[in-house]
Image (tube, rainbow, N blue to C red):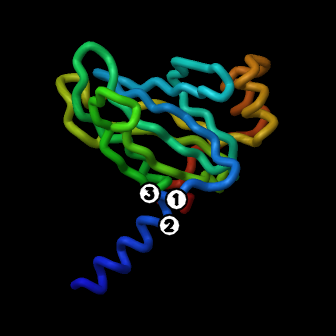
Amino acid sequence: VLGFGVWGFDILRDITAPQQGEMEIVVKGFQWGWFFDYPEAGVTGSSDLVVPVGTPIKFVLESTGNNKVLHSFWVPEWRVKQDVLPVETPEERRIIRVTPTLLGSTMVRCAEICGTGHHSMRANVYIVPQDSFEAWLAGEMTIEEIVAADNIEPLPLGANQ
């Protein structure tokens, strides 16, 4: 059992280590939805999660709003799920790292029962080419235009990201 613990710790350390060139996105869970902030680009309050394919992403998770409750950031296609906690200081926020490898679309879901609107706590996720991502950040393209231009299709369930 001790051997599995050491092995598991090694794997956890590897997958949570900072990656060169990673982009930070602040994920804000509230009753009953998600907002995504892109601090490096000055974009705040996006209701869609838009990320460039092949770029390491550092998600910084926090519960926000008047009724701060526990949520869980879950994207099954990326095989990630992490609790989103009410925090008092930035140092208390949870972090999860992902590098999306496939173009496509999926959903962020809340996997923690957080109240009467829990069932509707979802947000669209779009994994797009870098140039389209930059155009979206700059307000030059809408997500609908990107989906059409880049032929963004839903990811198959269990897509290995």
**Amino acid of disc 1:** Ala
> CB of mark 3 within 8 Å of CB of mark 1?
no
Quadrant where the N terminus lies?
bottom left
Mark 3 vs mark 1: in front: 1
Which SS class for mark 1?
A: loop
Q: Kindly report the distance in space between the C-alpha atoms of the residues bearing marks 3 and 2.
A: 16 Å
Mark 3 vs mark 2: in front: 2
Q: Residues within 10 Å of mark 2 (few under 14, many from 20)?
A: few
Viewer can see residue 136:
yes
Indicate which disc residue 140 carries: none
> CB of mark 3 within 8 Å of CB of mark 2?
no
Q: Kindly report the distance in space between the C-alpha atoms of the residues bearing marks 2 and 1.
A: 5 Å
To which residue does mark 2 refer? 14
Which SS class for mark 3?
A: loop
Indicate which disc residue 17 carries: 1
Q: Residues within 10 Å of mark 1 (few under 14, many from 20)?
A: few
Q: Quadrant of residue 43?
A: top right
| Side of 122 where 17 appears, left or right | right
Q: Kindly report the distance in space between the C-alpha atoms of the residues bearing marks 3 and 1.
A: 17 Å
Q: Position of residue 69 (x, y in %)?
A: 22, 28
> CB of mark 2 within 8 Å of CB of mark 1?
yes
| Side of 52 where 114 appears, left or right | left
Indicate which disc residue 79 carries: 3
Q: Position of residue 36 (x, y in %)?
A: 51, 27
